[in-house]
Structures are given as C-alpha cells and as structure tokens.
Image: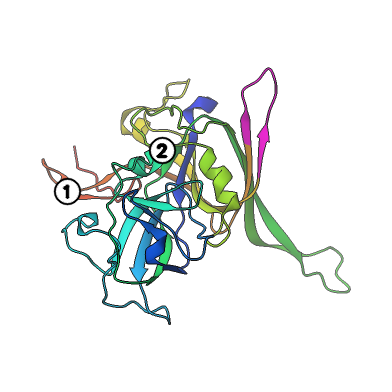
Amino acid sequence: MAIWLGSAGGISLGRTPTERTYGTIQPSGIDVAAKRFGFEELDHGLITGDRVWIRRVDANGDPVAAALDFVASSGWVDGVQHNDGRWFVNVDAMSSLRLFRTWREALAGSASAAIALQAPSGSCRVSYEVESSDDRCLAQTVSWVLNTDREVADFSSLGDGFRQRMGTMVSGSGELDCLFDFTAGLCADETAEEESSVYLHRLILRQDVGATFRGVFLLKQSAAIPISGLISGRDQERQLFYAADCVITEVGTELSATEAIHSKIKFVTTGPIQLLLDFPSSYLLQESGPPDRVLQETDFGILLEVAD
C-alpha cells in the first residue's frame, strides 16, 4: 500500500463562467488619464482577477456592430477596435475598473500596464460576463475537506416486512483552511500562478454574478512520491484529484495572538463530483515529435501520449 503525506496535495481554483449582466458606461464615468472607468450602476459585481467579456449591445441586450470606442485600439491584439473584447480587470476601492491583458498585471493594478482608454462619442450600453480562466494554485493552503453524501428515498409499501430504500442524488460540501494573506504566498510548485485567500473573501460578497468557483482538490500533485516508493515511471507525474463546481456559503477569519491568521471557507458543490487521475498538461501533444506541442490549452488540456 502506498502512503501519502498531506503535503502531497493542494487546491487549484478557477473562475466559473457567469450569466450576462448589463450596464451603461457614460463619458463622465471614464477617466482617460487614469485609465479607469465605471458603470452607471455602481454595483457591477466584479472583483480583481476576473476575466471579463465585454460586448456592446442595444437597449434590448442584442449585440451591435458599433465598436467599444471608450477602449483605445491598442487594447486589441490586431490594433483595431471591435464591438467586444476580453480582458482581466482590477477593481479599486471606488469600484472603478482598469483593464489588463494578463491576470498577473490585473492583480498588480498598475496604471502604467493598464489598457489605454479614450473619450467615447457618447454613452455605451454593454453586457459583461465573467469567463473561465486557467486554474490558479491556492497559496498558503493548510488543509481542505471535501464531503460527499448520497440521499436515500424510502419507497416501502404497506405490508412490507422490511423497509425498502434506494439511493438518489449525491451532494457535496467541504471546508478550506488557508493562511490569510492579501498577497499570494508560495505553492508547492514554484512555477504555478498563485491565488490568495482574499479572492475567496471577495467572492462571497459578490452579488450580481454569484460566489461560484471551480475547485480542483489535489490528493496527489505531479512528481509527488509516496513513502513506500511503490509508484515509478510516468505514474509519478500523474495527478489524483477531485473536480467540482462549488459555491461559497461561509467565510470566516480566525485570529489568535499566538498563531497566524487563518481563513476558514465553507462551500457546497453545485454539480457532479469527479475523482480523476490524469496527467497535468498545458498543451496538446501530437502523436509524433519533436516538435510535439501543437495547441496551447488550459491546465487540463487534452494529452495524447507519444509512444516510447
């Protein structure tokens, strides 16, 4: 039997896509010099690090051909203004937004790295929604618990000698414990992009677009070797993990004079809970190589093994 230490695991978080939300951007709400803007409706429900798809729409919410003229043409890869765009956002204390090309730049929130804005021709009605992005390692993780439960229905009939029951739906819940840090800490994989617990604290306060996240609960990280040493070869590179969409139900902060500050986060699952064993990969491999990387994907892209 292979024995695993708790340090072999961890948590990865991903943004869960949301439904469309609508808002209006007025010329008076755009600060071109500071590269930030706001919606006429103050509560937009976005938080720093969200990847947002913004589209220009009409009064009925249907996309229109007119460009997002408050964003400078340099905000698009091809240097041409379009009627929609995808950017990472940084939200300041006044709920104003800055747009960035990368997640790391959005976390830093530097005005020099923000995408340039310009004075629009008039008010702009837009739709916006949070898009999924690559999973981030939850820094400073202390422990996590994931519980699964199957409901049981009683279908006994009068006259039966024994009760008859059948299993029905599966539900899940859990709790995260991580050190509270407003900046990202160190994950086991130093090359991983790191998320801090502050995101989860902000997530539960988000109203319009919900408090959901995609959780990858790692039992075994890549390259982790059990104490018994029974696993060898490419199996050492496999990750064993639970995957589930979750919604946060409770966030607390535990403070003790002699201990580090802890974040206690409770959640419930909102769909299937999968136990998976797979190779972590950020690219699609072709059958022969080199070169064998043909398509860039997210952290859980398709992997086609190359025969030895």
Q: Position of residue 227 (x, y in %)?
A: 48, 20
Q: Is residue 5 magenta?
A: no
Alpha-carbon neighbours of circle 2 within 10 Å: few (<14), some, or many (≥20)?
A: many
Q: CA distance from mark 1 to mark 2?
A: 22 Å
Checking the image for residue 287, the label placed there is 1
Compared across the picture, whether 74 is left or right of 52 comes to left
Amino acid on which disc 2 is placed: Gln
What residue is shown at x 45% (from left), y 68% (from top)?
23
Checking the image for residue 272, the label placed there is none
Compared across the picture, whether 16 is left or right of 144 comes to left
Number of numbered labels in the structure image: 2
Compared across the picture, whether 75 is left or right of 263 comes to left
Q: Position of residue 111 (x, y in %)?
A: 33, 43
Q: Is residue 258 magenta?
A: yes
Residue under numbered circle 2:
239
Nearest-to-viewer mark from 1 and 2: 2
Q: Which residues are magenta?
A: 251-263
Within the image, what quadrant is residue 123 found in? bottom left
